[in-house]
Amino acid sequence: MPLQNRVLPSQEIVAVPARGLLMGNRGCLHGLGRELGVSRWRSKLWICCVLRWRDVRRDPMPPGRWTALFFLDEATALAAGHRPCAYCRRGDYLSYARAWQAAAPSGAVRVLPQVGGVLDPAKAKIVSAPPPLVGSMDIPSGSGQRQLHLAVGVSDNWSASGADGALKAVTTSSGTQGFAAPSDGEVTVSYDSSHGRWLSLRLVLAAVAIVLALPGRRRRT
């Protein structure tokens, strides 16, 4: 009897014998009886992966571990809300991020409300922002928890602040940069290009210090 782990474009998970070309992950959705519970997601990172990765084999429904979901093809996975995995499908992930950014409105910054703890893209509001996405912008007022999504890839170089101080960075399911959005007011977005260079310099200095500390590097007396 087939397991209930085939995903339709409508996001419905069904039990059919057909095989798929891609595998997905929404967290652990099954119980000890290898049957799905009420929840249809446990993680906001909805991804789709290759079926074969470095000859690793795993049970599709191991106890207490994530449930392997399967899609007929890429179109089905995207329609169901799953993006390419940034690890096993790095090239596809980068292409997806570039396409998303190119298709987004110019200088796109979106504010997404959370309904029942889940983001609702249908109620997203586009924020007028400078083309480079750096500078000050007015956030439309709204109640409850919300997220501010930028049409750029995730990077530690990005930061944002509001009237109450720095905004907390969040992970978006689309692989773009996000922040916890304030209820309203002005938000300032910044990009620190020196952050990556400073981190690289620190790593180099740490490596040099380790090499100099090796016994073989000490002078003989």
Image: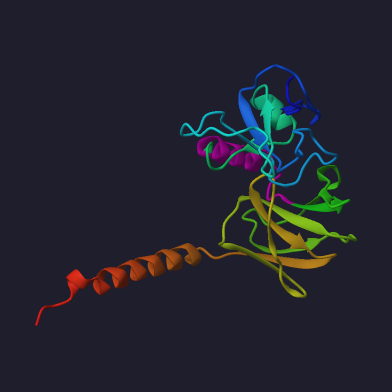
- Residue 128, by quadrant, is bottom right
Q: Main secondary structure of the magenta part?
A: helix
| Observer-nearest of 101 and 136 | 101
Identify the image quadrant of the C terminus. bottom left
Q: Residue 191, image x and y in percent?
A: 58, 63
Residue at left offset 59%, top offset 40%: 98
Q: Residue 145, image x and y in percent?
A: 84, 59
* In the image, residue 42 above or below residue 12: below
Q: Residue furthest left?
A: 221
Residue at left offset 69%, top offset 16%: 18
For the image, the number of numbered tags is 0
Q: Residue 165, image x and y in percent?
A: 72, 75
* In the image, residue 12 above or below residue 191: above
Magenta segment: 90-109
Lateral position of residue 39 relative to residue 155, left or right: right
- Residue 69, by quadrant, is top right
Colour pattern: rainbow
Residue at left offset 47%, top offset 31%: 55
Identify the image quadrant of the N terminus. top right
Lateral position of residue 158 relative to residue 118, left or right: left
Residue at left offset 73%, top offset 47%: 44
- Residue 45, by quadrant, is top right
| Observer-nearest of 154 and 70 | 70
